[in-house]
Image (cartoon, grey):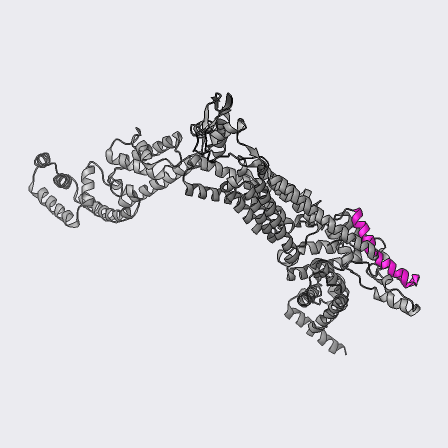
Amino acid sequence: MGIAPNHSSLLPETTNRISRKWSGRAVVGITFICLISTLSVRFYSEPRLGIGTFVDQDLRSPRTITATDIEATKQAKELAKQQVTPIYRSNPEMDTNAIKHLDELLQVGDNLRISSGNLPYVDRKILSDDVQRYLRRISNLDWSQLQDRANKLAANVNNQAAIASFINRDKEAPSIALAELTLYKINALPQDYQKLINTVTDIRKAYAITQQKAAKGPEMFRDRLLEMTNEEWEICKKLTRQALIDVQSTGIVAGLPDDMLQKRLTNLSNLPTNEEHRAMSISLLSATVKPNMTLDYVGTTERVLKASESVQAQRISLKAGDLIVKGGEKITERQFVILDELKMTQRQVNLNGLILMVATTAICFGIFGYANQRWQYLLKVKLHIKDLLALGIICTGSALATVLMAPNMLVFLPLASVSLIIGSFYSSRLALLITFLTSSLLALAISSDLLLLTPIVIGAIVAAAITNRPLTRSHLAATGLLVGFLQAAVYIAIALIAGATPPVLIAITALQYASGGLISAIVALGAIPYLEHISYALTPFRLAELANLDRPLLRRLVTETPGTFQHTLFVANLAEAAARELGADTALVRTGTLYHDIGKTLRPEYFIENQMGQPNPHDLLNDPWESARIVKEHVSGGIKLAQKYHLPEMLQAFIPEHQGTITISYFYCQAQKRSNHLVEADFQYAGPIPQSRETGIVMLADACEAALRSLGTETTLEAAKNLLMRIFQARWDDGQLKDCSLSWEDLDRIAPVFIKVWQERNHGRIKYPHLADKLDPSGSALPDHLCKPKDSVTAQIQKAISKKIALK
């Protein structure tokens, strides 16, 4: 989608086409060479004796050397990492939650005790605590028999000394209960004794009901709670709460084994001394204690990295003639480093690897070229030379980053930024295609680190799938978070399946993968503004900025040509609705439409929408050739204005392509009346015809705008559609739409959309009373007599009619 020359000469047009063709080939060729040069780095000087190579004879040191012992260095680094003490940080919120949880449990205990009647429920001078416990839990039959025996004993025994001796003889609860009940019956008034019996009876009922509730409640309250006195319960609550505060203050590490936590609680010294009460306190603490020490991953990672970096490289000394690799064995990593320092690895150019890389890259370019030529509709994009240049920069940059970061920094590789950038500029389908092709080349370039590359490739593919010209930059930031989480999850899954990596190292590496996703979003957000000045395509973010009416060109359109601006808004509404119906780029269509008639600001008075009832300058000219030249100038002049204000080429294309090469028929007909020797090209726009669906839609919307304005409210939908289809047919027959991928079926879908927009613009309005129109055109302020209730108004009208009849 480019700008054609303003003249119609065939030679310059052909020359420009050839120039564009060779420019495109040059961009592709340079990108191909850059990718090959970058991705083939490991093949330029590849050792013939590499790690894992089988040697058939002994390899000895030709001279005395001190080399790096890579295996010993790795072991030292791993040991330093494992010896690092993790950093934890406290979470006061967990302490608050633990205390809150304990208070809730204690409140449940309080409610159960209140429901059961508490203990003691009568004065201890009357009944001891043990007797009160006993009387609550015996059966109704035993309770009745106990009362009968107390009554008989109180009637037969004449002195209290006999009962006291009876108590001393038998220490069992039934005997003590009988004795205490009998003594109270003998010493108390009958009504007080009966009150005691009634109180015990009521408590027994409440106790039975509460036991059923306690059986369904917290386990620690089922056996001990109701048997405690009020004093014991309060002491237990106070000690348990203080013990919880003490335990939380010493710190509870997340993941602490249950047996260790239980042992820690059991050894607390400030718990109740009674074994049953102590057991209940421990149960309460077990249920409420919360881990309040969480691992500081960032701090621990920094400490681990510092510990690893602080380890100095381990060196090994070899004398001349010392054995390095024994014949019949494979070269280890440690031996390879020594051999490489001695220049015994026989490094040379790997021609097979280079040929494989060149062939694979050529295949990828072939797939991309075929897709660009044959699948443009599927990919939803038409690439220009500048787009190819931008894609070349993106792919070469990703290849260079991969080579530089592999293998040690590969986890931070921002490959997903490629998907985010391409998806923002073009479409998710093109982003998926290029991501697949680029990933295959990167996998070949670093074949020894494919396992490390897998999470990054998966994250990039997901980013490409969900990034389809997003309207906000926050989408890229959110996608970066998702990619980071996904890369970390995939790595953890691979590490767990492999089962050979320590958990701490898994956590650290997973965080590094997650940070790679965030880096991808940051790189994409930072690179897009620069690539927007290189590529032909524009992101929706840039289009939204250019559609701001405070931009210099649009502000000039609003202030200097208000009629053209209103025309532009209606065309924009029509074109945007049609683009949405056909699945075209609505943001591009709307922004492009705002600029399509910007050339009318040069001589606004020569366009009827800006004349505002003033004399038509074309009538004064009385020269159809000159008038046609002035009208055509709004295209050529618009292009010059757009170039002066550095409007992107993608938007510049809307200026000539919305008119194509149509004939200015009004002045052409006038000229035919005056001369028989006419050149129709003098009355035709220079073009080119629309090269994309977006500019084709704007051409149709611009052509139909005046026709739709002329339709009255009484026009039927069928008549309106017939009118639009005649306009479409004229453009179709004139060949204006042959290069823009619009089919006749698309035109048939556009017509109802245009009519719907026209109907919404010309919707019916409520007809307010004429007097209200005089006072307030909106009808919001009506005279008082029109605002009175209907019955009142009717009465006044009838009264006025009666008065007129009387006057007559």
Visible in this render: residue 166? yes
Q: Which corner quadrant of the image does residue 744 belong to?
A: bottom right
Specify the quadrant that holds the N terminus.
bottom right
Residue 569 is situated, as x and y percent measured from the top left of the image, at: 73, 58
Residue 520 is situated, as x and y percent measured from the top left of the image, at: 58, 42
Q: Which corner quadrant of the image does residue 622 belong to?
A: bottom right
> In the image, is residue 325 above or below residue 722?
above
Q: What's the magenta bit mostly, secondary-structure-wise?
A: helix
Q: Residue at x 32, y 41 (%)?
A: 110
Residue 484 placement, left or right of 151: right
> In the image, is residue 709 above or below residue 449?
below
- From which residue to which does the magenta span run? 616-645
Q: Toward the viewer: 373 or 78?
A: 373
Residue 21 placement, left or right of 312: right
Q: Toward the viewer: 163 or 562?
A: 562
Asked if residue 619 lies in the magenta stretch, the reply is yes
Specify the quadrant that holds the C terminus.
bottom right
Residue 114 placement, left or right of 402: left
Residue 74 is situated, as x and y percent measured from the top left of the image, at: 46, 29
Count up the numbered dots.
0
Asked if residue 566 lies in the magenta stretch, the reply is no
Residue 634 is situated, as x and y percent measured from the top left of the image, at: 83, 56
Q: Toward the viewer: 630 or 200?
A: 630
Visible in this render: residue 525? no
Q: Residue furthest front?
A: 57
